[in-house]
Amino acid sequence: MDTVSDIARGAAIWLKRLWPLLLLFAVAGFVVAMGWHRYLTLEQLATHRFALRAQIEGNLLLALSVFIALYAAIVALSLPGGAVLTIAGGFLFGWLIGGAASLIGATIGATVVFLIARSALRDVLVARAGPALKRFAEGFRENAFSYLLFLRLVPIFPFWLVNLAPGLLGVPFATYVLATVLGIIPGTFAFSLAGSGLDSVIEAQQAAHQSCLAKAGEGGQESCPYGLDPSLLLTPELIAGLVALGLVALIPVAVKWFRRRPA
Protein backbone atom coordinates (compact mmCIF):
# COMPACT_ATOMS: atom_id res chain seq x y z
CA MET A 1 0.00 0.00 0.00
CA ASP A 2 2.84 2.37 0.85
CA THR A 3 4.44 1.73 -2.56
CA VAL A 4 1.19 2.44 -4.39
CA SER A 5 0.70 5.57 -2.31
CA ASP A 6 4.24 6.77 -3.05
CA ILE A 7 3.75 6.19 -6.77
CA ALA A 8 0.46 8.09 -6.73
CA ARG A 9 2.03 10.93 -4.77
CA GLY A 10 4.98 11.08 -7.19
CA ALA A 11 2.64 11.08 -10.18
CA ALA A 12 0.62 13.91 -8.65
CA ILE A 13 3.79 15.96 -8.11
CA TRP A 14 4.93 15.40 -11.70
CA LEU A 15 1.47 16.25 -13.04
CA LYS A 16 1.39 19.45 -11.02
CA ARG A 17 4.80 20.39 -12.40
CA LEU A 18 4.24 19.40 -16.02
CA TRP A 19 0.60 20.27 -16.66
CA PRO A 20 1.34 23.63 -18.39
CA LEU A 21 3.78 21.92 -20.76
CA LEU A 22 1.38 19.04 -21.40
CA LEU A 23 -1.40 21.55 -22.07
CA LEU A 24 0.74 23.31 -24.68
CA PHE A 25 1.50 20.00 -26.39
CA ALA A 26 -2.17 19.01 -26.33
CA VAL A 27 -3.42 22.29 -27.78
CA ALA A 28 -0.68 22.32 -30.45
CA GLY A 29 -1.53 18.74 -31.40
CA PHE A 30 -5.23 19.60 -31.61
CA VAL A 31 -4.57 22.62 -33.84
CA VAL A 32 -2.39 20.56 -36.19
CA ALA A 33 -4.91 17.69 -36.24
CA MET A 34 -7.70 20.11 -37.19
CA GLY A 35 -5.51 21.61 -39.91
CA TRP A 36 -6.01 25.18 -38.68
CA HIS A 37 -2.31 25.98 -39.10
CA ARG A 38 -2.77 25.65 -42.87
CA TYR A 39 -4.70 28.92 -42.90
CA LEU A 40 -1.52 30.82 -41.96
CA THR A 41 -0.35 31.37 -45.52
CA LEU A 42 0.10 34.41 -47.74
CA GLU A 43 -2.31 32.83 -50.21
CA GLN A 44 -5.08 32.91 -47.59
CA LEU A 45 -4.17 36.50 -46.75
CA ALA A 46 -4.37 37.47 -50.43
CA THR A 47 -7.73 35.71 -50.84
CA HIS A 48 -9.39 37.31 -47.80
CA ARG A 49 -7.59 40.66 -47.71
CA PHE A 50 -10.61 42.78 -48.57
CA ALA A 51 -12.81 41.08 -45.97
CA LEU A 52 -10.11 41.40 -43.31
CA ARG A 53 -9.60 45.09 -44.00
CA ALA A 54 -13.35 45.67 -43.88
CA GLN A 55 -13.48 44.02 -40.44
CA ILE A 56 -10.58 46.13 -39.18
CA GLU A 57 -12.12 49.47 -40.22
CA GLY A 58 -13.87 50.92 -37.19
CA ASN A 59 -12.57 48.11 -34.93
CA LEU A 60 -8.86 48.87 -34.89
CA LEU A 61 -8.23 48.27 -31.18
CA LEU A 62 -10.22 45.02 -31.15
CA ALA A 63 -8.49 43.84 -34.33
CA LEU A 64 -5.06 44.63 -32.86
CA SER A 65 -5.91 42.79 -29.65
CA VAL A 66 -7.04 39.72 -31.58
CA PHE A 67 -3.93 39.86 -33.76
CA ILE A 68 -1.57 40.11 -30.76
CA ALA A 69 -3.38 37.26 -28.97
CA LEU A 70 -3.21 35.07 -32.10
CA TYR A 71 0.48 35.84 -32.58
CA ALA A 72 1.26 35.05 -28.93
CA ALA A 73 -0.66 31.76 -29.19
CA ILE A 74 1.16 30.71 -32.38
CA VAL A 75 4.56 31.39 -30.79
CA ALA A 76 3.64 29.74 -27.47
CA LEU A 77 2.39 26.64 -29.28
CA SER A 78 5.56 26.60 -31.45
CA LEU A 79 3.52 26.44 -34.64
CA PRO A 80 4.84 27.67 -38.01
CA GLY A 81 3.43 30.94 -39.28
CA GLY A 82 5.26 33.68 -37.38
CA ALA A 83 6.76 35.18 -40.54
CA VAL A 84 3.38 35.13 -42.30
CA LEU A 85 1.70 36.85 -39.34
CA THR A 86 4.40 39.52 -39.25
CA ILE A 87 3.89 40.21 -42.94
CA ALA A 88 0.12 40.20 -42.41
CA GLY A 89 0.48 42.72 -39.58
CA GLY A 90 2.31 45.16 -41.84
CA PHE A 91 -0.18 44.50 -44.64
CA LEU A 92 -3.30 45.05 -42.51
CA PHE A 93 -2.19 47.72 -40.02
CA GLY A 94 0.78 49.43 -41.65
CA TRP A 95 4.45 48.71 -41.01
CA LEU A 96 4.75 50.70 -37.76
CA ILE A 97 1.59 49.59 -35.93
CA GLY A 98 1.74 46.10 -37.44
CA GLY A 99 5.41 45.71 -36.52
CA ALA A 100 4.77 46.86 -32.96
CA ALA A 101 1.84 44.45 -32.61
CA SER A 102 3.95 41.57 -33.95
CA LEU A 103 6.74 42.48 -31.55
CA ILE A 104 4.38 42.44 -28.56
CA GLY A 105 2.74 39.16 -29.60
CA ALA A 106 6.04 37.40 -30.26
CA THR A 107 7.50 38.56 -26.94
CA ILE A 108 4.44 37.41 -24.97
CA GLY A 109 4.43 34.00 -26.65
CA ALA A 110 8.19 33.52 -26.20
CA THR A 111 7.94 34.53 -22.54
CA VAL A 112 5.18 31.97 -21.92
CA VAL A 113 7.41 29.19 -23.30
CA PHE A 114 10.36 30.42 -21.20
CA LEU A 115 8.36 30.47 -17.96
CA ILE A 116 6.83 27.05 -18.57
CA ALA A 117 10.21 25.50 -19.40
CA ARG A 118 11.80 27.07 -16.31
CA SER A 119 9.07 25.94 -13.92
CA ALA A 120 8.44 22.50 -15.42
CA LEU A 121 11.83 21.14 -16.42
CA ARG A 122 14.68 23.22 -15.02
CA ASP A 123 14.91 21.49 -11.61
CA VAL A 124 14.94 18.08 -13.25
CA LEU A 125 17.66 19.14 -15.69
CA VAL A 126 19.81 20.62 -12.92
CA ALA A 127 19.47 17.47 -10.80
CA ARG A 128 20.50 15.17 -13.65
CA ALA A 129 22.99 17.38 -15.47
CA GLY A 130 26.56 16.18 -15.74
CA PRO A 131 29.64 18.36 -15.22
CA ALA A 132 29.90 19.27 -18.91
CA LEU A 133 26.30 20.49 -19.10
CA LYS A 134 26.69 22.43 -15.86
CA ARG A 135 29.78 24.20 -17.20
CA PHE A 136 27.96 24.99 -20.45
CA ALA A 137 24.97 26.42 -18.53
CA GLU A 138 27.25 28.56 -16.35
CA GLY A 139 29.10 29.89 -19.40
CA PHE A 140 25.84 30.66 -21.17
CA ARG A 141 24.41 32.48 -18.13
CA GLU A 142 27.59 34.54 -17.76
CA ASN A 143 27.09 36.04 -21.24
CA ALA A 144 23.37 35.34 -21.56
CA PHE A 145 22.39 38.72 -22.97
CA SER A 146 25.00 38.66 -25.77
CA TYR A 147 24.31 35.02 -26.69
CA LEU A 148 20.54 35.50 -26.71
CA LEU A 149 20.80 38.70 -28.72
CA PHE A 150 22.91 36.88 -31.31
CA LEU A 151 20.48 33.94 -31.49
CA ARG A 152 17.53 36.30 -31.93
CA LEU A 153 19.21 38.38 -34.59
CA VAL A 154 20.61 35.43 -36.56
CA PRO A 155 17.92 32.71 -36.89
CA ILE A 156 20.29 29.73 -37.10
CA PHE A 157 18.09 27.80 -34.66
CA PRO A 158 14.28 27.47 -34.65
CA PHE A 159 12.48 30.23 -32.77
CA TRP A 160 10.82 27.71 -30.42
CA LEU A 161 14.18 26.25 -29.40
CA VAL A 162 15.59 29.67 -28.55
CA ASN A 163 12.45 30.25 -26.46
CA LEU A 164 12.85 26.96 -24.60
CA ALA A 165 16.58 26.62 -23.94
CA PRO A 166 17.15 29.77 -21.82
CA GLY A 167 14.51 28.63 -19.34
CA LEU A 168 16.31 25.30 -18.94
CA LEU A 169 19.72 26.99 -18.60
CA GLY A 170 18.66 29.38 -15.85
CA VAL A 171 18.82 32.68 -17.74
CA PRO A 172 17.36 35.53 -15.64
CA PHE A 173 13.86 36.59 -16.65
CA ALA A 174 14.69 40.27 -17.26
CA THR A 175 17.72 39.35 -19.39
CA TYR A 176 15.63 36.97 -21.48
CA VAL A 177 12.83 39.46 -22.14
CA LEU A 178 15.16 42.38 -22.94
CA ALA A 179 17.34 40.32 -25.31
CA THR A 180 14.22 38.90 -26.98
CA VAL A 181 12.66 42.32 -27.59
CA LEU A 182 15.85 43.91 -28.90
CA GLY A 183 16.85 40.85 -30.92
CA ILE A 184 13.63 40.48 -32.89
CA ILE A 185 13.12 44.19 -33.66
CA PRO A 186 15.15 44.28 -36.94
CA GLY A 187 13.62 41.16 -38.50
CA THR A 188 10.11 41.99 -37.29
CA PHE A 189 10.03 45.48 -38.78
CA ALA A 190 11.77 44.30 -41.96
CA PHE A 191 9.01 41.75 -42.59
CA SER A 192 6.33 44.22 -41.50
CA LEU A 193 7.68 46.81 -43.94
CA ALA A 194 7.63 44.19 -46.69
CA GLY A 195 4.03 43.37 -45.76
CA SER A 196 2.97 47.01 -46.07
CA GLY A 197 3.82 46.86 -49.77
CA LEU A 198 2.35 43.42 -50.38
CA ASP A 199 -0.62 44.69 -52.42
CA SER A 200 1.51 45.25 -55.50
CA VAL A 201 3.16 41.83 -55.10
CA ILE A 202 -0.24 40.11 -54.81
CA GLU A 203 -1.60 41.88 -57.88
CA ALA A 204 1.50 41.03 -59.92
CA GLN A 205 1.39 37.37 -58.84
CA GLN A 206 -2.33 37.10 -59.58
CA ALA A 207 -1.88 38.70 -63.03
CA ALA A 208 0.96 36.31 -63.85
CA HIS A 209 -1.11 33.36 -62.61
CA GLN A 210 -4.13 34.32 -64.73
CA SER A 211 -1.93 34.86 -67.77
CA CYS A 212 -0.35 31.44 -67.29
CA LEU A 213 -3.78 29.80 -66.97
CA ALA A 214 -5.01 31.48 -70.15
CA LYS A 215 -2.02 30.16 -72.10
CA ALA A 216 -2.06 26.68 -70.56
CA GLY A 217 -5.73 25.96 -71.19
CA GLU A 218 -7.10 22.75 -69.64
CA GLY A 219 -4.98 21.34 -66.87
CA GLY A 220 -3.42 24.74 -66.29
CA GLN A 221 -3.86 24.58 -62.51
CA GLU A 222 -1.12 21.98 -62.29
CA SER A 223 1.32 23.74 -64.59
CA CYS A 224 0.55 27.22 -63.21
CA PRO A 225 0.76 27.02 -59.43
CA TYR A 226 -0.13 30.15 -57.47
CA GLY A 227 1.93 30.87 -54.41
CA LEU A 228 3.45 33.59 -52.27
CA ASP A 229 6.50 32.41 -50.36
CA PRO A 230 7.49 34.56 -47.33
CA SER A 231 11.03 33.18 -47.53
CA LEU A 232 11.49 35.20 -50.75
CA LEU A 233 11.53 38.31 -48.56
CA LEU A 234 14.72 37.07 -46.89
CA THR A 235 17.01 38.83 -49.31
CA PRO A 236 20.80 38.39 -49.12
CA GLU A 237 21.05 42.02 -47.96
CA LEU A 238 18.64 41.42 -45.07
CA ILE A 239 20.43 38.23 -44.03
CA ALA A 240 23.81 39.97 -44.19
CA GLY A 241 22.47 42.83 -42.07
CA LEU A 242 21.11 40.49 -39.40
CA VAL A 243 24.36 38.51 -39.31
CA ALA A 244 26.34 41.74 -38.92
CA LEU A 245 24.14 42.84 -36.02
CA GLY A 246 24.50 39.38 -34.47
CA LEU A 247 28.28 39.58 -34.64
CA VAL A 248 28.16 43.00 -32.97
CA ALA A 249 26.15 41.42 -30.14
CA LEU A 250 29.01 38.96 -29.55
CA ILE A 251 31.66 41.67 -29.19
CA PRO A 252 31.34 41.80 -25.35
CA VAL A 253 31.91 38.01 -25.20
CA ALA A 254 35.03 38.31 -27.37
CA VAL A 255 36.36 41.18 -25.23
CA LYS A 256 35.92 39.09 -22.05
CA TRP A 257 37.70 36.15 -23.67
CA PHE A 258 40.69 38.25 -24.74
CA ARG A 259 40.97 39.87 -21.31
CA ARG A 260 41.11 36.46 -19.63
CA ARG A 261 43.88 35.19 -21.86
CA PRO A 262 47.23 34.98 -20.08
CA ALA A 263 49.68 37.71 -20.99
Image (tube, helix red, strand yellow):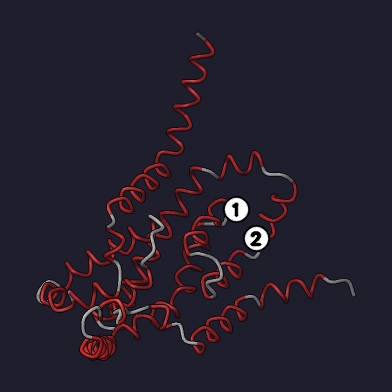
Type of amino acid under label 2: Phe
Of labels 2 and 1, earlier in sequence is 2
Is disc 2 placed on a helix, strand or loop?
helix
Where is the C terminus found, in terms of image quarters? bottom right
Q: Position of residue 33 (x, y in %)?
A: 31, 50
Q: Nearer the viewer, residue 149 or 7?
A: 7
Residue visible at 19% across and 76% down?
47
Type of amino acid under label 1: Leu
Q: Disc 2 versus disc 1: distance between alpha carbons?
A: 8 Å
Q: Position of residue 111 (x, y in %)?
A: 43, 58
Is disc 1 placed on a helix, strand or loop?
helix
Q: Where residue 28 is drawn, which disc sits there?
A: none
Quadrant position of residue 94: bottom left
Please name the residue that numbered disc 2 is placed on: 140
Task: Tell me: residue 1, above or below residue 73.
Answer: above
Task: Tell me: residue 245, above or below residue 65.
Answer: below
Residue visible at 34% across and 60% down?
74
Q: Nearer the viewer, residue 42 or 64?
A: 42
Q: Residues within 10 Å of mark 2 (few under 14, many from 20)?
A: some
Q: Where residue 169 is drawn, which disc sits there?
A: 1
Quadrant position of residue 54: bottom left
Q: Position of residue 120 (x, y in %)?
A: 49, 42
- Pointers 2 and 1 in contact (C-beta within 8 Å): yes
Q: Is residue 71 left or right of residue 175?
A: left
Residue visible at 28% across and 79% down?
97
Q: Residues within 10 Å of mark 1 (few under 14, many from 20)?
A: many
Q: Position of residue 141 (x, y in %)?
A: 63, 59
Q: Residue furthest top?
A: 1
Residue visible at 64% across and 39% down?
127
Q: Is residue 104 left or right of residue 261?
A: left
Quadrant position of residue 55: bottom left
